[in-house]
């Protein structure tokens, strides 16, 4: 037992034996979470699920703190006592992109070795894995966790983390490492060691309205000006730098026989390096009207910094590989980067060692084929247990 206590790999193996005995229980818990639909837009629905999670975590010995939110569901902090050191943070969310009623078209089901349903992959399986990793690790370690564990579950991740970001950063600063239970990257189960930063810009053009038949020459078309601005904005993309811009939503005009007085575009931006946030902002703020009789207004910016592949991230990844190999000699845990953001972007930007994509293995996040590979759940949960032990 002494040797096991000092060996994250051995603890992970001990936890795996317990987790494998509880797969039926984990599946039942997952079904409950999926069937309690929790769209970011419905505080009532999300809070209902939050109350259920509160009871589930208290049942296994967690101390739950509710962090109220006005426009979103209340966020949950769960603390488990441990023997030594600073806590590790398990990070996730229980809001989903799916509106209430989606279950009618995407029911929870187990089929072809997978679990299907809205939010099952992103990321309700990750929450079930958190519960059982903590529970199994404590039992494998003689009844006590080797270090404190803090779980932070937010309710607005899918819509930008506006109400939770400050607390996410505060809690992360108090921890030695952050393990993000977002889904893995693809069906190979790769963890994520880099994520792009994310932002939004809006460019609004004001021109001059006139009748397109009677006073055509008196108008100044905001739509024509915006079209030229979109062409200029598209040139901001620099694939070698990992910097992309996507004019995704365009609005303008009132009628076909009116020269448009107003038009605007909403632009999604992604950056691989934090230093490029200033570069991109300078480019947007530097836009000038092609038609001097039109006026431009630019707003927005990068709101989620990139998670860069730093030495601290790499050290966590290498430890995860060691634990994975201890669980299965044939398991060569892969790493990948992704253009999508998560709350792990915030913690990594603070310099807190962060490893992302430790949740379920599957595919179809935000899509109708969202699903989790059942066979991967036990060892992924045990991997998390070993990482908690390693600290």
Image (cartoon, rainbow, N blue to C red):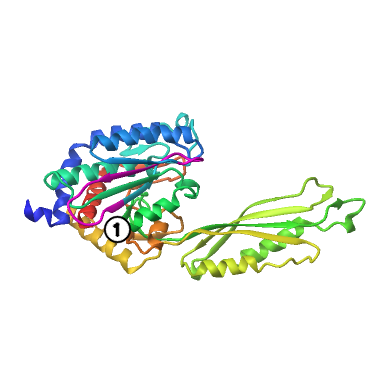
**Residue 110 located left or right of residue 241:** left
Name the spot of residue 189 as percent of width and height, x first.
32, 52
x and y percentages locating residue 81 in the rendered image: 22, 47
Nearest to the observer: residue 121 or residue 116: 121
Chief secondary structure of the magenta portion: loop
Q: Position of residue 252 (x, y in %)?
A: 73, 50
- Residue 77: where, in percent of width, then height? 34, 44
The segment highlighted magenta reads 69-89
Q: Is residue 131 magenta?
A: no
- Direction from residue 298 to residue 173 in the image, left or right: left
Which quarter of the rendered picture does the C terminus lie within? Answer: bottom left
Residue occupying image coordinates x 32% and y 69%: 311
**Label 1's element?**
strand
Q: Is residue 253 visible?
A: yes
Q: Which residue is mark 1?
A: 177
Q: Residue at x 72, y 53 (%)?
A: 263
Seen from the viewer's position, the closer of residues 176 and 102 is 176
Q: Is residue 94 left or right of residue 389?
A: right
């Amino acid at each position: 037992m002494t040797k096991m206590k000092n060996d994250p790999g051995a603890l992970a193996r001990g936890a795996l034996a317990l987790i494998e005995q509880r797969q039926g229980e984990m599946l039942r818990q997952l079904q409950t979470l999926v069937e309690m639909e929790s769209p970011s837009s419905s505080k009532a629905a999300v809070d209902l699920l939050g109350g259920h999670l509160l009871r589930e975590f208290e049942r296994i010995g967690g101390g739950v703190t509710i962090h109220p939110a006005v426009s979103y569901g209340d966020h949950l902090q769960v603390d488990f006592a441990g023997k030594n050191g600073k806590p590790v943070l398990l990070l996730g969310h229980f809001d989903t992109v799916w509106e209430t009623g989606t279950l009618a078209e995407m029911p929870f089901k187990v089929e072809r070795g997978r679990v299907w349903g809205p939010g099952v992959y992103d990321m309700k399986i990750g929450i079930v894995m958190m519960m059982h990793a903590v529970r199994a690790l404590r039992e494998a370690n003689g009844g006590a966790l080797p270090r404190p564990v803090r779980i932070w579950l937010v309710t607005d991740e899918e819509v930008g983390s506006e109400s939770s970001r400050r607390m996410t950063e505060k809690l992360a600063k108090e921890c030695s490492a952050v393990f993000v239970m977002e889904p893995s990257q693809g069906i190979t189960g790769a963890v994520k060691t880099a994520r792009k930063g994310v932002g939004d810009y809006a460019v609004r053009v004001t021109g001059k309205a006139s009748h397109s038949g009677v006073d055509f020459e008196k108008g100044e078309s905001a739509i024509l000006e915006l079209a030229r601005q979109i062409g200029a904005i598209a040139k901001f993309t620099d694939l070698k730098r990992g910097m992309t811009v996507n004019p995704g939503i365009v609005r303008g005009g009132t009628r076909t026989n009116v020269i448009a007085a107003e038009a605007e575009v909403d632009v999604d931006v992604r950056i691989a390096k934090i230093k490029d946030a200033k570069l991109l902002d300078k480019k947007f703020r530097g836009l000038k009207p092609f038609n001097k009789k039109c006026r431009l207004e630019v707003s927005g910016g990068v709101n989620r910094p990139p998670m860069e592949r730093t030495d601290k991230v790499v050290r966590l990844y290498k430890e995860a590989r060691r634990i994975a190999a201890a669980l299965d000699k044939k398991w060569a845990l892969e790493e990948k980067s992704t253009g999508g953001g998560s709350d792990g972007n915030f913690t990594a930007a603070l310099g807190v060692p962060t490893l992302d994509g430790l949740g379920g293995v599957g595919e179809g996040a935000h899509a109708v084929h969202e699903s989790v590979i059942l066979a991967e759940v036990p060892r992924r949960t045990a991997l998390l247990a070993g990482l908690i032990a390693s600290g």
